[in-house]
Amino acid sequence: MKKLLHYIKPYWFWVIIVIGLTFAQVQFELALPDYMSDIVTNGIQYGGVKDNTPLALRAKEMEHLLIFSEEDEKILNNYTLIKADKEVYVSNQLVRFDEDIYVLNSEHDDLNEILLRPIVYVSLIDSGMIPDIDKDQLYDLLEMNDSLLKEVKTEIDEMIKGYEDNLEGTAILFVQNEYKAIGMNTTTIQTNYILHVGLVMLGVSLLSVLCQISSTYLSTKIAAKVAAKIRGDVFRRVETFSSAEMSHFSTSSLITRTTNDITQIQMLTQMCLRIVLMAPMMGITSIFKVMRYPNLIWLLLTAMALIALVMILMLVVAMPRFKIIQSLIDKLNNVMRELLDGMLVIRAFNSEKAEEKRFDDSNKTLSKTLLFVDRSMGIMMPFMTFLMNVLTIAIIWFAAHEIDINAMQVGDLMAFIQYTMHVMMSFMIVAMIWVMIPRTLVSAKRVFEVIDTKDIITDKDEVKMLPLENGDLVFDDVSFRYPGAEDAVLEHISFKASPKEVVAFIGSTGSGKSTLIKLIPRLYDVSEGAITYSGIDIRDVAQKDLREHIGYVPQKAVLFSGDIESNIKFGREVDNKTLNEAIDISQSRNIINEKDEGLSSKITQGGSNVSGGQKQRLSIARALAKDANIYIFDDSFSALDYATDKKLRAELSEMIKKKNATVFIVAQRISTIKNADKIIVLDSGKMAGIGRHEELLKTCEVYQEIARSQLSEEELANA
């Protein structure tokens, strides 16, 4: 995870912006249930009256309230007495009334707490709580008799005991009735309130959407950039691999790691920046919201405990299989790659059924594992849906009692359900992400395994520079063994190759010819001894500098998708003269002339639209187009006919002399190398002979056996 954070670090500023936008989105979304509760409770239930401080009330009702208040002066200071038969604006309504009223001043103190109990007392008395006595007469008695006032207040307090938290509703209903008595249009008040809160909700929703779009865009961009950086690092890392590192990772595995595994990392990065950030914010904030209703919170805690239990079970069951899945994807890709590469061979041997079975076995194994994991994870969604529905029913069931005793409003119930669903959804999202993280960590481990692979072949801190002109290349008692192998592939190889010389290697299959010439460009490093070029140990030279002096044609000719010209130039600046010389020497001119588009003719991936001989000639042309001092041909003439081989070698010989170059040729045919200046015969990794063709026919038994298998008696006699 630390390594992944290292890739996210350059985008820390935008990550902070995403966090800020996500936090804002959460706050906007969680404000909506409260607004909805206000519409249901204040807008619908209380007719748009949102608090218990009346904007206007009749003078006689004010007198009644003052009987029960101990802060008469403060109340009266916040109201203005308006005489009857006048017009005045109350809540933007022009009201004409027949009796004196008190109108709340534009600048006033908060009177909700002060007026709450007096309004409840008056409201209950007006409703006829004390029978057999006229209420106006009762108010007169209460105003004159303090002991009676105290007795009535005590009686009312006993009646409302246990309902203190919901006295405001009773007070608001009193205010609503007072507005009707004055002649105010309560329908207009209700409509205006609902429209006002509704417009606020629309504005909040719009802000939430804008935050969501912005944070999604930025998180997607950050995740894509992180994935691109990781993918680039993997590719650049693979480019530095020697043959030893390449043998550690299969090609199909590297492709899977570069595509599927990095895509998993990209998805997790995006989800972490969006969902993983939002879910805890949403859940924690919603928990604080539902804590306002302590009598019902136990329902939520029970549901969360059940989800946690299921999540743990899912992790125990599914997590071990995530690593298996990635390995099975590697295996399937490897089988698929082999089938595609070897399709012609499969058809030639009528092995379609056997290969189909091999592919089906890999495919079915992967499918079974994926199905098991997906089914295990699929259980969670219906379980969560069922649990959320059961929780909703339970909340309504238990909240109905709270509403019945006036301890909770219908709007509060609706808000509580929404906040509970937010908590549940947040918890579910965290659970899903928690399940995804192990799989992504497996992918990340596989990717960083490539990036963190230590190079076996490295450059020294202080490197030497090779001279521009060509010099002697010397193998000084060189031995080589593959990493981890006990036996040496090459033992005690010593020879010198000078400029303008052609040095050839021949021997039986597995004698070490290709391995030997791979030591020259440091695709492998020698285990013992040294290789020097112009008197400098090639291990003291930067690999890039060394390879700039070498033109290399591998044993398996490789062409890249593009056209003929791009394959010959291969990303280098090559002038037309050099390009044409390389084409002519490699005998590739007829390939180009046969194509309608000439040098612009398309080459498909791997050069599948050209023959083996054409592929070899174009690969040779690519090496010759490079201005090099050393040219290496690793069995690069095997697919050429004898006439083309002869012409190519003749023109190559002239080019060597003109460029003062050194050429190394690995070959199986004696006819290809018999004119070489030095022929080195290898047998089981050891030098069995060195010299010219004629000398070896006389002195080297291994060479004689090869010659007798390839040359006629007449050719042997004339040698």
Image: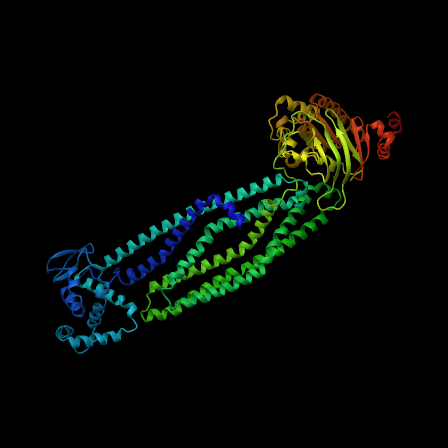
Instruction: Tell whether 625 sits left or right of 151.
Output: right
- Image coordinates of residue 99 in percent, x first then y, are 12, 63
**How many numbered tags mark residues here?**
0
Quarter the C terminus occupies: top right
> In terms of depth relative to the viewer, which is nearer, 57 or 710?
710
Above/below status of 78 relative to 453:
below
- Can residue 696 be seen by looking at this rendering? yes
Residue sitting at 13 percent across and 72 percent down? 143
Instruction: Tell whether 412 sits left or right of 329.
Output: left
- Image coordinates of residue 472 in percent, x first then y, are 72, 28
In the rendered image, which quarter is residue 646 located in? top right
Above/below status of 365 relative to 300:
above
- Can residue 555 be seen by looking at this rendering? no
> In terms of depth relative to the viewer, which is nearer, 43 or 587?
587
> In terms of depth relative to the viewer, which is nearer, 102 or 193?
102
> In terms of depth relative to the viewer, which is nearer, 506 or 43?
506
In the rendered image, which quarter is residue 533 located in? top right
- Image coordinates of residue 128 in percent, x first then y, are 20, 74
- Image coordinates of residue 251 in percent, x first then y, are 65, 43
In the rendered image, which quarter is residue 56 located in? bottom left
